Amino acid sequence: MAKNYRIAVIPGDGTGPEVVREALKALDAAAKRTDFTTEKVHFDLGGERYLKTGDILPEETLAQLRTFDAILLGAIGHPDVKPGILEKGLLLELRFKLDQYVNLRPVILYPGVDTPLKDKGPEDINFVVVRENTEGLYAGAGGFLRKGTPHEVAVQESVNTRMGAERCIRFAFEYCRKRNYRKKLTLCGKTNVLTYAFDLWQRAFYDVAKEYPDIQTDYSHVDAICMWMVKNPEWFDVIVTDNLFGDIITDLGAMIQGGLGIAAGGNINPGGVSMFEPIGGSAPKYTGMNIINPVAAIGAAQMMLEHLGETAAAALIEKAIKKVVSSDLKSLSAGHMGYSTSEVGDLVAGYIAG
């Protein structure tokens, strides 16, 4: 009997519904080829709902989302909603309440995709960032004193627990072993300045490392990581880091792999429900124009299938993405692909179907 997966779909704002539509085409084509089924339930969450109702993430909706096998997200961000409201109230709330404590970001340059790095190719840019996703500066600890006065004070605290750091680090070691590429795990931190937080991280890292003698370990300050990602990206296999540094270096990673149009990520709870998304924004200026690049969203569907254990289906999607970006698209930029959003989705689905 074919296995069935219940997928919660959050199309979101701006061009999110357009790219999710194409990701679902790829998902359906892969399911048909590899004999599993999906039950998809769409959720109206994002800026439009907030503007109409004042709701961001109702408790009953959160309870429903816990029952799914995975979540596929399009994009969150609305020009008429003040920055920070949706990010904190929806994106961070989903990560925290669903305990998606790992943000997983492959940084892979596919053949045929341009990188701004001189003399670097697919053999040089192939690494993964494992970012702690529920603690650090994003935990929201802090506040204001004398707000609005000339003597205003703002304090934002980085919250790092041994449990939180260690479970993320352990995930990274396991992922590095499973990936079986260079078998090298790099801790990215700032031990020379952030002497409390990264003392904890470093001790946890080397304690866990004793259980993984087959994995080579390395440490680098975050500023050095940024330099080496540009100069020598081939040095990296898997990088593990905290929430803020992970947020920063993964955007740099997106640029060296070809841009936001191809970068996908996962918010992982190994024992619960995980959420997968293109890492670019909602691009509201392109809404409804059918010109946005859906490849990153399709890549998010591929990551979702890999996470669910449907490795054959995930491989079909990845192969189709490689074919499209190397043989069909003129560019990864919106409006310059040579195809519409829906046509790119059709190409990918067609290659999957065989």
Image (cartoon, rainbow, N blue to C red):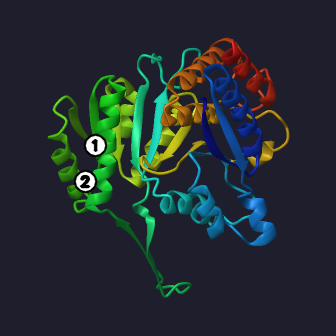
- Amino acid type, label 1: Leu
User: On the rendered image, what quadrant is the C terminus found in?
Assistant: top right
Please tell me whether mark 1 sits on a helix, a strand or a loop: strand
Q: Position of residue 237 (x, y in %)?
A: 34, 29
State the residue at coordinates (81%, 68%).
52
Q: Give the mark nearer the N terminus: 1 vs 2.
A: 1
Residue 258 in sight here? yes
Which one is nearer the viewer's eye here, 116 or 273?
Answer: 273
In terms of image quadrants, where is residue 99? Answer: bottom left
User: On the rendered image, what quadrant is the N terminus found in?
Assistant: top right
Q: Position of residue 320 (x, y in %)?
A: 63, 18
Which one is nearer the viewer's eye here, 84 or 229?
Answer: 84
Q: Position of residue 255 (x, y in %)?
A: 54, 34
- Amino acid type, label 2: Trp
In this rendering, is residue 72 above or below 56? above
State the residue at coordinates (46%, 78%).
143
Q: Which mark is residue 201?
A: 2
Q: Which mark is residue 187?
A: 1
In terms of image quadrants, where is residue 286? Answer: top right
Please tell me whether mark 2 sits on a helix, a strand or a loop: helix
State the residue at coordinates (69%, 22%).
331
Q: Is residue 230 left or right of residue 278?
A: left
State the residue at coordinates (23%, 63%).
196
Q: CA distance from mark 1 to mark 2?
A: 9 Å
Q: Is residue 59 left or right of residue 250?
A: right
Q: Are marks 1 and 2 in contact (CB under 8 Å)?
A: yes
